[in-house]
Amino acid sequence: MRRYPLDRMSSTPDRDQSSGQDSGLTYAGAGVDIGEGDRFVEIIQQHVRRTHGPRVIHNPFGFAGLFRLDYDESLFRKNYREPVLVACADGVGSKIKLAVDLDRYETIGVDLVAMNVNDLIVQGAEPLFFLDYIACGKLVPERMEKIVAGIAGACRFCRCAILGGETAEMPDVYSADELDLAGFSVGVAELGRVMDPSRVEPGDVVIGLESDGVHSNGFSLVHRILESSDLDPTRIYPELDEHKTLGEVLLAPTRLYARPLVRVMKNYTVKKVITGMAHITGGGLAGNLERALHAKIDAVIDRSAWNTHPVFPFLQEHGNVAPEEMDRVFNMGIGFCMIVRESFAASIQKQLLRLGERPVVIGRIERGSGQVVLSEA
Amino acid sequence: MRRYPLDRMSSTPDRDQSSGQDSGLTYAGAGVDIGEGDRFVEIIQQHVRRTHGPRVIHNPFGFAGLFRLDYDESLFRKNYREPVLVACADGVGSKIKLAVDLDRYETIGVDLVAMNVNDLIVQGAEPLFFLDYIACGKLVPERMEKIVAGIAGACRFCRCAILGGETAEMPDVYSADELDLAGFSVGVAELGRVMDPSRVEPGDVVIGLESDGVHSNGFSLVHRILESSDLDPTRIYPELDEHKTLGEVLLAPTRLYARPLVRVMKNYTVKKVITGMAHITGGGLAGNLERALHAKIDAVIDRSAWNTHPVFPFLQEHGNVAPEEMDRVFNMGIGFCMIVRESFAASIQKQLLRLGERPVVIGRIERGSGQVVLSEA
C-alpha cells in the first residue's frame, strides 16, 4: 500500500551515485540496501496498521488503499441519508524547517494530520482516512519513523485510518537535510448538515478553543524573527516556559480539534445547534472566522476573554512586530472557533471541557455586514 | 476551496522579507500584492471548475471540497452494491527537476494526475476526484497556471474532479526555482471486483499498452546520464526524434491509461474477464507485473513483441547502463499491463485501439512460482 518498497529501489542508488562512488551508472540493487529498506518498510507498516479499523481492507499487493463504505455499523445506510465526501490537502508550511534545524521529528506529523482533519471538521465532516507525502533529499529511517509515528498517533486519536502514502527520496530536488510533508484527508458529512454560513443568526455565541501556541501557521515570520533577533531556539526563556526550550515551545503540535468536535457534533444530529466553525490558520482569527459568516451579521469578539499564549507577546516583542500583523499571521491563542445557539453554549462548553479542551466564550453574533470585529485587548 | 487566498497572504511577505527590504518584520499586506493574488486565484479557479461535474458541491467558503456520492445517476445505489473507496498518493519524482531546468511546465501536471489515477485503476477503481499539493520557493503565477492547467486537463480527460489543493510558497524550505508536486486521488470500486491476484489463471493473456517514453520514473538515473554524458537536453537528436529536443522527448507526459481502462472495464461488469493489471512505474515491468500474480503462476513475457521506445536504447548507450538496470528502472516501452482471459483478448485489444491505445499481446500466464519471466530481446 505504501510505496516504500519500490521507492527504496529507485532512490537508494541516487545516494550511492551522488556520493561519487565508482560504481558507474547503475541503480544500486544490492542486498544490504534492500534488506535495510524492507526492515524500514516493516516498521512503518506497524505504525500504519495501528490506525486501521474494520473498514480498511487488507491490500498487500496494490499501491492504493481500500476503504469500505459499509461495514457492520452500516455507516452510510444507517447514519447518513445523503452522504457527501469531504476532502482537503494541506502541508505544515515552514514549520518543517524548524523541525529539521532542531532535529526534532516527533510531533511534526501531528501538525500534518491536524492541519487536514481540522479543516474537514469545519465542514461538518467526520474524518475517515488520511494519506501522506513525504519528500526528502536523503531517507533517514529513524527520522522517517518518528514522522510516521507522529502521523499514526494523531490519526488513531482522530479515528482516521492511514490508507496510503508516498515517501520520495529525491536528491536532485532536495538537499540531504531538506524535507517536506503534505497530507490529504477524506471525511464524510451529511449533505443537509454541511456547514452553511446562512444558518448563523444574531444572538449566537462564539466559543473559542485555546491553542497550544503557534500551531502550523506563521512560521515564515517566526524564522524572520529568529534570524533578526538574538533568540536561541535551544535556550530556555523562563518568561516563556520554565522547562521547555524556545524551540520546543514553537514546535508544540497543532491541537487535534477534530476529535472532540466529532463527539460534540454527534450529540446534535437533529437540531442545528452548531451553526459555524473555523480552524484558525493563516489569516488569523478574523480572516478565518469571517468565512463562517454571511453578509448581514458580524462576529463581535472580546479579546480580553482569553489569555493570549505567552509565545505571542514574546515573539512580538523580540521581532518588533506590529499588533495588527500579529493578528493577521498568528492564532493569538485561539486555535478553533465554534458558533453555537446561545441556549446550548453552556452545555457545549461543559462537553468540550470534559473532552480536554479549554473552551472560552469569546464573542457573540450581531447584526452587521459580514465582519469580524475585534475589541481592543 | 483551494487555499490560495490565505496562502498568498501568508507567503507574499516572505518574498519581501527575504529580499531584504527595510519594511521591518511585518507581513506585506499591501493592496497590489493581494490584488495580484486574487487575480491568480481566479485564473486557477477557472481551470479547476472545468473539471467539476454535477457531483461536486459548490463550497466557496471552506478549505475542503465536497463530493456527492449520490446524484441523478445514483452512483452508489444503482451501480455499486458494495462500494469501496480507493485512495492513493504519489508525486512525479525527479522529473520535476527537468521541467524546472527547461522551464517547461505544460505537461508535468499530466504526469502528476497519471501517476495517481493509473494506480487507482489497477485496483479496479474508477477515479472520482483529485487534490494537489504544489510547494515552491517563489510563487510565479504563469508557472503555476501552466501546472494547474495540465492537472485540470488530465483530470477532465479522466472524468475526475479537482476537489481541492494547496499551493505553498515556502522560501525557507525551497529556493526560488525549486518546486515539488504531490497528488492524491480517490476512486470507487465494487468490493467483489477489486483486483485480486488469485483470479489469474494459466492461459490468461498479458496485453501491454505502449508508453510514450520514460513517463515519470527513473529520472534520478536520467539526470545522472545527462550529467555524465555530453547530451544537451535543448538539442534535437535525429536518431531519437527529428522534431523534438531531447528535453521534450524526456518530458513527454505519462499516458492516462485510467480513461480507456475505465471504459473497457465497464464492458465486463458481470464476468471477470480482466484478471489483473499493473501500472509500470519504479521497478519496471517485472517489479510491477509481479504484484498482479499469485505464487503458482508465472507471466512469461516475449520482449520481441513490442517496439522499445527509442529513448531507452538512446539513454542506455549514452549512459552506458547495464540492460538489467534499464529493465529495473524504466518501463522500456510498456506503460501498463492487463491480464485477461484468452477468449476476450482480441476484443479487448480492438476496444483499446479504438480508444487510442497501442495494445500488444506481450505474454501469457503459465504455471510457475509468482515470477515474471522476460525473454531475451
Image (tube, coloured by chain):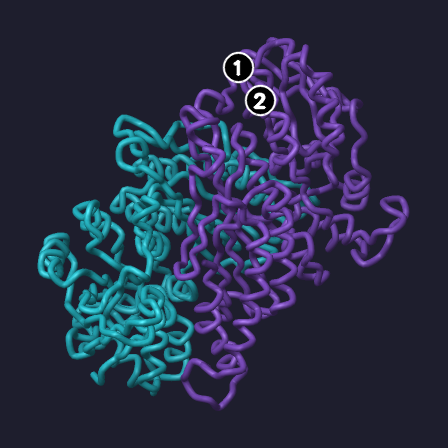
Chain colours: A purple, B cyan
Q: Residue furthest bottom?
A: A22
- In the picture of the structure, the residue carrying the numbered disc 1 is A199
**Which one is nearer the viewer's eye here, B285 or A90?**
B285
The numbered dot on residue A176 is none
Q: Is residue B317 visible?
A: yes
- In the picture of the structure, the residue carrying the numbered disc 2 is A276
| Position above or below: B211 against B34 | below
Residue at 27% across / 42% down in the picture?
A: B159
The crowding category of the residue bearing disc 2, from other C-alpha atoms within 10 Å (few below 14, some 14 to 19, many at least 20), is many
**Which one is nearer the viewer's eye here, B282 or B242?**
B282
Q: Secondary structure at mark 2?
A: strand
The crowding category of the residue bearing disc 1, from other C-alpha atoms within 10 Å (few below 14, some 14 to 19, many at least 20), is some
Amino acid at pointer 2: Gly
Q: From the top left corner, tell me how far across and down residue A11 is, in percent.
A: 47, 72
Q: From the top left corner, tell me how far across and down residue B64 is, in percent.
A: 48, 35
Amino acid at pointer 1: Arg
**Which one is nearer the viewer's eye here, B264 or B39?**
B264
Q: Secondary structure at mark 1?
A: helix
Chain designation of label 1: A
